[in-house]
Amino acid sequence: MANGRVVRTADRTIGSRQLAGLLPAEVLARPGYRSLADALRTLVLDGRIALHVRLPAERELAEAVGASRATVTGAYDLLRESGYVRSRRGSGTWTELPEGHRPVGAHALVGAGGYSADGEPGIDLAIAAMGAPEGALADALARAAPRLPEAARTPGYHPFGLPDLRTAVAERFTRRGLPTRPEQILVTSGAQQAFTLVVSLLCGPGDRVVTENPTYANALDALRHARLRTGSIAVSDSGWDMEIAESTLRQTVPRLAYTIPDFHNPTGALMPPEQRLRLLAATRRTGTWLVVDETIADIALDVPAPPPLASLAPRGGADHVVTIGSLSKTHWGGLRVGWIRATAKMITELTAVRVGADMTGSVLDQLVALPLLDGMDRTLPARLDELRLRRAALVEALQRHTPEWSWQVPPGGLSLWVDLGEPVSSALAERAAAAGVHIGRGARFGVDPGTFEHRLRIPYTLPADRLDEGVRRLAAAFHDGVPLPPAVDRPYWVA
């Protein structure tokens, strides 16, 4: 399974190569028994390896990760001592959790039926996305239905995407200030697939890439799964330090740079136009592909929606820019429709990679996406109004329940990047899970192990009453009188 998913196999076994593919690149580069144990612990706690799954034999895993058998034996011994695996002679080694611990991954709430340990309904504060706008899907389905019989008479394979949808996406880019032709668009099954396809085409194992730090957790998972060497450009509450960014690009000369300039996930920062110009110029000088994630670009709450970053380049100066986006944040995550905007040549090459992965996207989803995209300018304002109200509700809840925490209200996006004042994010997330609250711990968004342990990402995408209840439970977990252990005492938080 891909990184970021729960590993569940028919015989409850994970193979050595499959497990090696889930391990961070830094562990594979210099495998030590403690770092290997820490990484395996993290995979269990994050739910990327399910519980009660048999791990590979020591010799098999040693060969897969390029380590000695003694290293794997030492790692398994540490995991047994801390309660994260159990072993039976002749049966193998199986994943477990120590007494009193629960997995922090999304499956924790699902496995518990969406309830906390005392039976209270669960609250998911990890997913920064809203439900579909009221009536929007039904209306889009009604408008798509007359086109379905005609589409059904064809084989249904459209590797590039439905021609009409490619045209619609291209026209939206053009209206936003970036002239685009349909042949410059590839329709994908969401923005995550778009990013994975780009990485697969442009990068090979061991290539150097640069991302912001912190950044979107699932993008980091994709880079680690591809076994890339990841450098970072810090994004603080005050935004990007472009001098450091330019220096990093100049010194590392990465193959690819990944950026979220529009209401950055998780900080909410908005990159100023002059910094966008500098980033364009710096990546062009180093021959670096610049991948711009526009998934949240339309969630502009206090400022106008920014134009595409590539539109700021002089004529012919943005051929190295690849832009990805989707309807997941503006409409609904269950509608798996995203896109890539690049040169026509690259779109053809990306489509060849896509065919090898999943052949084509869902025709029905794309038919539904057409009226949604066509009506976005009419329907989005009400969506943004609702998000402003929910953002205010989250701020009010935090001020009431956790006044010692700090945060900045972003001009757009879907979440607050909250400073806890002490490095206890993972322990708090673990304790909150027992209270039925699933939350994005800061370390999930960090490029380097152990970073952002003083942060939580808290989306404001739930209704106000659920946000207040979620924050109340977080505050209770934070203030329950039992000190939360700092990150340095819990190495399995490394992500």
Image: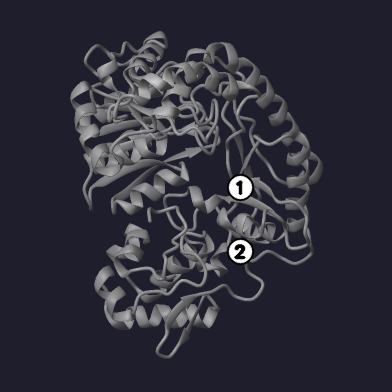
Where is residue 253 drawn, in percent x and y? 23, 40
Residue shown at the point (43%, 32%) measured from the top left: 260
Residue shown at the point (27%, 24%) measured from the top left: 342
User: Circle 1 sits in a helix, a strand or a loop, which is it?
Assistant: strand
User: Circle 2 sits in a helix, a strand or a loop, which is it?
Assistant: loop
Q: In the rendered structure, are the residues bearing label 1 and label 2 in contact, judged by CB atoms less than 8 Å apart?
A: no
Where is residue 422 drawn, in percent x and y? 64, 55
Whether residue 32 is situated above or below residue 325 in the rendered picture: below
Mark 2 surroundings: few (<14), some (14-19) or many (≥20) residues within 10 A: some
Q: Quadrant of residue 302?
A: top right
- Label 1 or label 2, whichever comes before in sequence order: 1
**What's the CA distance linking mark 1 and mark 2?**
14 Å
Instruction: Depth check: give the residue in front, 51 or 487.
Output: 51
Where is residue 455 drawn, in percent x and y? 59, 48
Which quadrant holds the N terminus?
bottom left
Instruction: Depth check: give the residue in front, 6 or 457.
Output: 6
Amino acid beneath label 2: Pro
Whether residue 361 is situated above or below residue 166 in the rendered picture: below
Where is residue 262 drawn, in percent x and y? 48, 26
Depth check, mark 1 against mark 2: the one in front is 1
Whether residue 27 is situated above or below residue 235 in the rendered picture: below
Mark 2 — residue? 486
Q: Is residue 147 left or right of residue 117?
A: left
Residue shown at the point (58%, 58%) measured from the top left: 104
Amino acid beneath label 1: Leu
State whether residue 250 appears in this view: no
Mark 1 surroundings: few (<14), some (14-19) or many (≥20) residues within 10 A: many
Q: Which mark is residue 456?
A: 1
State whether residue 11 appears in this view: yes
Instruction: Depth check: give the residue in front, 208 or 217.
Output: 217
